[in-house]
Amino acid sequence: MSEDIYDIAVIGSGPAGEKAALEAAGLGAKVVVIEKGVRPGGASVITGTIPSKSLRETVKYVESLSRNDVSGVDLKLDRKITIPELMHRKNNVVTERVEDILEAYKNRGIEYVFGKGRFASPNEIEVDCTECRRLISVKAKKFIIAVGTNPYHPPDITFDQKHVLDSDTILQLDRIPESLAIIGGGVIGCEYASIFCKLGTQVFLIDPRGALLDFIDHDISEALAKQMEADGIGLCLGCQYETVEVKSDNVHIKLDSGDEIIASALLFANGRQGMADELNLEVCGLEVNNRNQLEVNNNYQTKVPHIYAIGDVIGFPSLVSVSNEEGRMAARNAVTGENTRRVGSDIPYGIYTIPEISMIGPTEKELKEAKIPYGVGICKFQDLARGLIIGDRKGLLKLLFHKETHEMLGVHMYGQYASELVHIAQAVIHYKGRIEYFLDNVFNFPTLSAAFKVAARQGLTRLGGTD
């Protein structure tokens, strides 16, 4: 690699680091990326988002073969699916994504260093280079920290990566477990509960809170809980684990309710923490918070102006979509000095349970707390021609709009393609559109998008605004 001083050194090649490097190079900066893993992509590509969603698509496809209530065709598998078969799509997608990232770096003239780095001074990183097997020095005018997070491991649980796993190692299973206990009813826990129950695994989902995904709309959370129970998932909500112990090739989880769950494996999915504490930031005059994360300003600068931080290592909302934008914005400020803004308002969320969940804007609870007068319009997918055609009888769309101005405030969805459909609402909300937009425009037929029209009419009817 070059002995020159780089304009930008990006530490970490997950979604935030990848987009920061590409943006900076596109603006003419000399860029180097430092990645401690053996492949670029971070948790998003290697262990998290893309692998789990690829696995989910395979599971959905296998399940669809047995949906003769929809197709009228009986194509049931005559045997159980194997782990190699299950992971085939996931492995292919990950490999292609890694190759795409490396090709993009090459095309932009970005240099790449495999190895674990730590600051030797505010302007220099010492990297234990994996390829050259020695310490090398990387100097730069500015640094962008994008090291991401790793799963939280409570001190009272031993993770043996066979019986007790975290969200990074769950896809390394050598078998489909007969039973799986999951601690954590957040996004990761709910997604994997949906996936494994469709594989015939008996799933137990444990969470100390009284509701699944307690940050989403109450009606959507309830719909998810009902679907999970219908799928045979044992919900242990409002329960906390007391002890976790591996005995006789099973995991025994004792709950504070006095119950005990015995499962073939345990997935602990209750939080992640930043990895900024591994960078020797003290030499730069920087400190991390109690979750090993960094504080930044609107330009993504830490209190040391030439050192930036982006992505999950700065905390909420920890979404790939947001991390991508944070990377671009931090790079623009670092290269051009252009002032940017923190991403975080009016962003869509996608939760890939089966069916999936998506939302944008406040929930009913938040509107009530803010004392904002609002109306509600609801459409069930079972009332749509497209819903009947694809067999989605559980889907639900909920519109929230200002009771007086009719301006769109929020949309909450549960059902097939929810994470795609939400962007229709995102555009209307962004441009401060009114709920009447959905009634005044023609939508294709038959589509799930027609749910917006049905929900809009129902919401206005409640207010007495239309027939």
Image: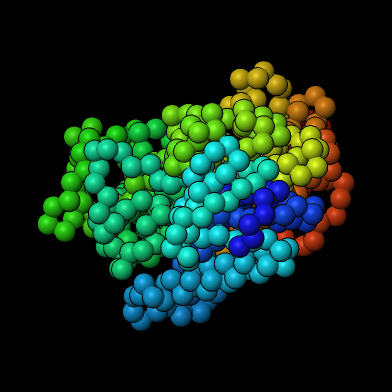
Picture coordinates of residue 218, whole percent (x, y): 53, 35
Q: Quadrant of residue 264?
A: bottom left
Q: Is residue 41 left or right of residue 367?
A: left
Picture coordinates of residue 364, whole percent (x, y): 61, 29
Farthest-out residue, top: 371
At 79% across and 38% down in the image, what residue appears?
Answer: 337
User: Viewer-proximal residue, 36 or 218?
Assistant: 36
At 22% across and 35% down in the image, what residue appears?
Answer: 242
Whether residue 32 can be seen here: yes
Q: Quadrant of residue 105?
A: bottom right
Whether residue 280 is situated above or below residue 85 in the rendered picture: above
User: Viewer-proximal residue, 4 or 373?
Assistant: 4
Farthest-out residue, front: 3
Whether residue 50 is situated above or below residue 303 in the rendered picture: below
At 65% across and 25% down in the image, what residue appears?
Answer: 367
* Quadrant housing the N terminus: bottom right
Whether residue 114 is situated above or below residue 349 in the rendered picture: below
User: Viewer-proximal residue, 155 or 83?
Assistant: 155
Picture coordinates of residue 128, whole percent (x, y): 45, 55
Whether residue 73 is situated above or below residue 287 in the rendered picture: below
* Quadrant housing the C terminus: top right
Q: Is residue 126 left or right of residue 177?
A: right
